[in-house]
Amino acid sequence: MGASDHTLTSIEICAGAGGQAIGLHQAGFRHLALVEIDPHAAATLRRNVAHREGWDFEREHCDIIEGDVNDFKPMVQLEKAFAYFKRELRHGDIDLLAGGVPCPPFSHAGKQLGKDDERDLFPQMLRLVDDVRPKAVMIENVRGIKDEKFQDYRDWVWARLEGGEAKDPVTGELETHKGAGYKVCGWKVLEASDFGVPQLRPRAILVAIQADLLAGQDFQWPTPCAEPVTVRKALEPTMTERYEQLIKKGGDLGRLAQVKLDAWLGHKTGIAPTLVGGSKKHGGADLGPSRAKAAWNELGVNALGVANSLDDCVAKDSWERDLLRDRGPMLTVAQAAIIQGFPPEWDFEGDKSEGRLPGKTAQYRQVGNAFPPPVAHAVGEAIAKVLRAARPQQNGPEGGR
């Protein structure tokens, strides 16, 4: 299979466990590269691309690169993309460059060091824009980047893409940028719960599209869904399945499990607080800071840890810890993934033999740090609509593009 008029291609950096990749795939984009530095998340990407139904394109054409974005050079590094285009990559070959660059530099939960944080990868994203010149750019980050203290930084990113005056984030001097030929369609905060995700997770998303492709049309941000999804609705099938493993045992244990399930079903329902991935350097997995734990408690969930999977719970006999404590049941990794909007068939890798980072913790952190697939899907569809409408007026390179 070679390059096609109908295939929308993408490259994604900081791909994590695939939350954004799933959503963009659902929106019609086909990935030529997924770049991720965390070995557990990269293993998750490889596992799912290798086995998921509907990911045939990626199995043949996608390079999954486990490495540092700072070292990523797509124009010379993507072997499968070269085979797809039957030639070297050229400017404009890639339809979308996307990435959820690390959030700690701008997160309210961190020190908000912005440009002074070594994890700030906006400069690398802009380098890749210059290298690849994709038709569209999508950058996702935390809501904190929209704070007033980062106005100059946002102006600088905007000017690098579209042109104009902005202060250099290193020198602080006002400079005039010619831009890279893009029209920035906005830097908008979208709430995950507006798109069917049972969680309060505001994300700041920048979309930019090559200016000449927008001639005669406008980019339209996706509109929220009518009905929010509650935690109870999202988790009831899996929570019931977990308790029923005990209930069917009968006796005092079975009766207690039924009481606990009834209690959970009778709890206040609503939207979950934002899941967090936690620090790689400190502690195990839990569902967030004190305020988040209190909110989870209102929903009948014990937020002090993450439960074993159903199979591991049976094998380790961890019913008391996972399901029967007074604070209520803890969530499994699979249930946290539901709260994040992942499809149920998506698997998460974690090396259980690595003592300092148990498999369950590695898996949960991938979930907690993810971009909810339904939000990526909605934004991806809005971008795809513009790109497809512009296709007839383009004179693509050989190979039908």
Image (cartoon, rainbow, N blue to C red):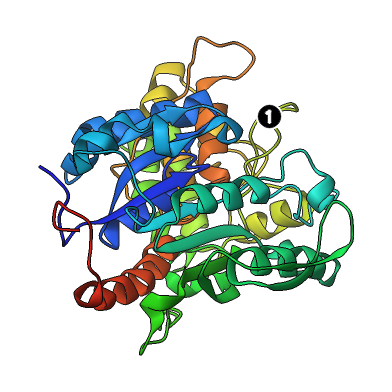
Left or right placement of residue 47 versus residue 355 in this view: left
- Tell me, yes or no, if residue 269 can be seen here: no
Q: Secondary structure at mark 1?
A: loop
Residue 215: percent from the left, percent from the top? 38, 85
What is the number of callouts on the image?
1
Query: Which quadrant of the view contains residue 280?
Result: top right
Residue closest to the far right: 172
**Residue under the point 62% across and 41% down:** 277
Q: Is residue 23 above or below residue 79?
A: below
Q: Nearer the viewer, residue 163 or 50?
A: 163
Q: From this viewpoint, is residue 12 visible?
A: yes
Query: Which quadrant would the C terminus be assigned to in this image?
Result: bottom left
Q: Residue furthest left?
A: 1
123 vs 274: above or below: above
Instruction: Kindly give the residue lying farthest to the bottom in the view shown.
Output: 216
Considering depth in this image, is 8 or 324 the residue closer to the camera? 8
Q: Position of residue 132 (x, y in %)?
A: 44, 49
- Residue 153, percent across and down? 77, 63
Looking at the image, residue 108 lies above or below residue 389:
above
Image quarter of the N terminus? top left
**Residue at the image point whose x is 46% and y is 17% from the top:** 316
Which residue corresponds to mark 1? 280
Q: What residue lies at 31% left-to-right and 69% top-to-bottom?
A: 384
The residue sitting at 40% across, 30% down in the picture is 77
- The three-letter code of the residue at mark 1 reads Lys
Percent of width and height locating residue 222? 42, 78
